[in-house]
Image: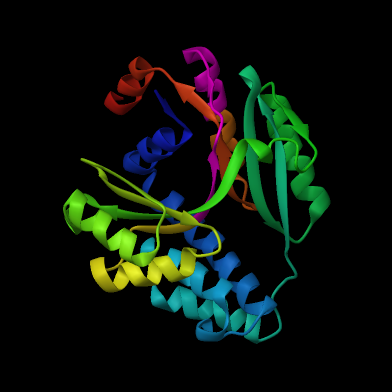
Amino acid sequence: MAGHSAFKNIMHKKGRADAARAKMFAKLGREITVAAKMGTPDPAMNPRLRLVIQAARAENMPKDNIERAIKKAAGGDADTYEAIRYEGYAPGGVAVIAEALTDNRNRTGGAVRAVFTKYGGNLGATGSVSHMFNHVGEITYPAGAGSADAVLEAAIDAGADDVVSDADGHVIACSFESLGTVAGALEDKLGAPTGVKAIWKPNLSTLVDDEKAETIMKMIAALEDDDDVQNVYANFEISDELLKKLTAA
């Protein structure tokens, strides 16, 4: 079976090209500005900023964009953003977490609630579904970064907890607290990763039929399209048949 992570990989491969990339850079820029404003603009002295910059570089965000986002915070003219985690259920009892950075809680909350309602879901209180997930670090590398054994050895040396390797690449898991340290150690051994991020990884998954899966996918896409929503996670599984259909589409 395959779930939300497989769906996201398919969507990324399909591209949605420049518009999606521009939106992603805008969201990363907001995270960089917030991190720099909360601490110091020097990533060597600001672990949160260092981690976000690692994630931005992994997504090939231009250096000028990164520096501009930091300067925006240092200049004191940046908007004040609040980090909010929305939790609820999609059709079929699937748990959903949406992380947002917003300068207007009412606007973002209303927009997120509207998406849940439109697709037959229910928005709950913070903490209502997060117990079905583990907050962990995830670092990804392409298949060409090395053999499964070589990446496993590097991951063990870096202090990671788990590695999954297949034809598409390597996914390395670590604790949320050690993400920056592990990512830095891996970069020294394997080069720049293609992804560095903190994620909510399901520890309990829900299998849904194809019809519900397609509705949930539309719901996730609508949430991710909101400028204030940074990340969306869900704990659903889909059939191998639907996965093949999506991959071939």
Q: Residue at x 71, y 80 (%)?
A: 77
Find out whether residue 212 is within the magenta segment: yes
For the image, the number of numbered tags is 0
192 left or right of 225 in image: left
- Residue 114 occupies quadrant: top right
60 left or right of 231 in image: left
Residue 199 position in % (x across, y down): 53, 50
Residue 1 shows up from this direction: yes
101 left or right of 186 in image: right
Residue 68 or 184: which is nearer the viewer?
184
Q: In which quadrant of the rendered image does the N terminus lie?
A: top left
Segment colored magenta: 198-217
Q: In which quadrant of the rendered image does the C terminus lie?
A: top left
The outermost residue toward the right is 106
Is the residue 103 above or below the residue 234 in the image? below
Residue 97 position in % (x across, y down): 64, 40
Residue 25 or 43: which is nearer the viewer?
43
- Residue 61 occupies quadrant: bottom left
Q: Residue at x 27, y 24 (%)?
A: 248
Q: Residue at x 65, y 21 (%)?
A: 93
Find out whether residue 185 is within the magenta segment: no
Residue 17 position in % (x across, y down): 37, 48
219 left or right of 77 in image: left
Q: Residue at x 39, y 34 (%)?
A: 6
Residue 30 position in % (x across, y down): 60, 66
Residue 193 shows up from this direction: no
Is the residue 226 above or below the residue 23 in the image? above
